[in-house]
Image (cartoon, rainbow, N blue to C red):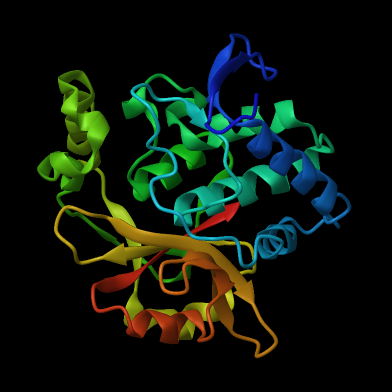
Amino acid sequence: MKYKFLFIFLTTCLAVKAQQITCSPKDKAAVENKLVEIDGMYDGNFGETMVSVGKSFMKTPYVAKTLEIGDTETLVVNLHGLDCTTFVENVLDLSKLLRQKDLSFDAFVKNLEVIRYKDGELDGYASRLHYFSEWIANNVEKGLLKDITGEIGGAAITKDINFMSTHRDLYPFLADDVNYSKIKASENYLNNQAICVLAQDEIAKNEHLIQSGDIIALATSINGLDVTHTGIATREKDGRIHLLHASTGSMEVEVSKLPLADYLKGIKSNTGIMVARPL
């Protein structure tokens, strides 16, 4: 019988308890092939490793909502189609495996859970780090990242974060009242936290402080949202920082043709960036 659909299975994945995963045989094979492809990429510079691993995904299709599967939150494994966040998550995961010298599927799955979920543990839909400012903050708490935005000229701002709860119809999982109430609680928590943003007109003069491999989050003026897009900084041959990302323009993973500072000027709602450095 041919496998046509994703299926759910249980695996320990080096965790204390069994973890539910959504992964097809094709998706598992894609991870295993990627692990073979990237073997040897780590040369001691983690930032450059992030870029090398990220560029190994060039031309991979942009696909939205790859994590919105089924009726129950599971750890989705999918390298065939990436959105901007899952691109960054998978690149960070794979780069960590190279440094850990453990290129196994089990280690990949465990790292992915740690990166994607609050405090590193999948516990329902609301445990996923939906808002990217929270994704950064929680991964800072885990010791995976350092938020360097303030160090490179950023300033603290506050903003009402409520896009998910005020657009409930866009998120199928929020039809469940328990999920909805938990997301509201997360938003209330975020509304009491300042975030640091490097203003768009300050990026060019501070660009020299950004390193290849830094994670870039695009802050926005859209009501209720903190971040609309994310990617990885890469210093290209022109000496400028560009954005390596799963692009909604080309609908594939690419490096921005324009330097980051110029690229952002073409995005009307962009207010600046957050910058997080993998540790």
State whether residue 92 is above or below residue 237: above
Identified at 36% across, 49% down, the residue is 133
| Residue 35: percent from left, percent from top | 79, 44
| Residue 264: percent from left, percent from top | 38, 79
State whether residue 148 is above or below residue 209: above
Q: Is residue 149 visible?
A: no
Horizontally, is 137 left or right of 17 in the view? left
Please identify the residue farthest to the left as the structure is shown.
166
Identified at 48% across, 60% down, the residue is 62
Q: Is residue 255 visible?
A: yes
Question: Where is the N terminus found, in terms of image quarters?
Answer: top right
Please identify the residue farthest to the front as the structure is shown.
1
Q: How many marks?
A: 0
Please identify the residue farthest to the right as the structure is shown.
40
Horizontally, is 155 left or right of 108 in the view? left
Horizontally, is 147 left or right of 225 in the view? right
Location of residue 178 by image quarter: top left
| Residue 90: percent from left, percent from top | 60, 46
Identified at 34% across, 41% down, the residue is 130
Q: Nearer the viewer, residue 68 or 51?
A: 68
Please identify the residue farthest to the top as the structure is shown.
17
State whether residue 202 is above or below residue 100: below
| Residue 235: percent from left, percent from top | 64, 77
Identified at 37% across, 37% down, the residue is 68
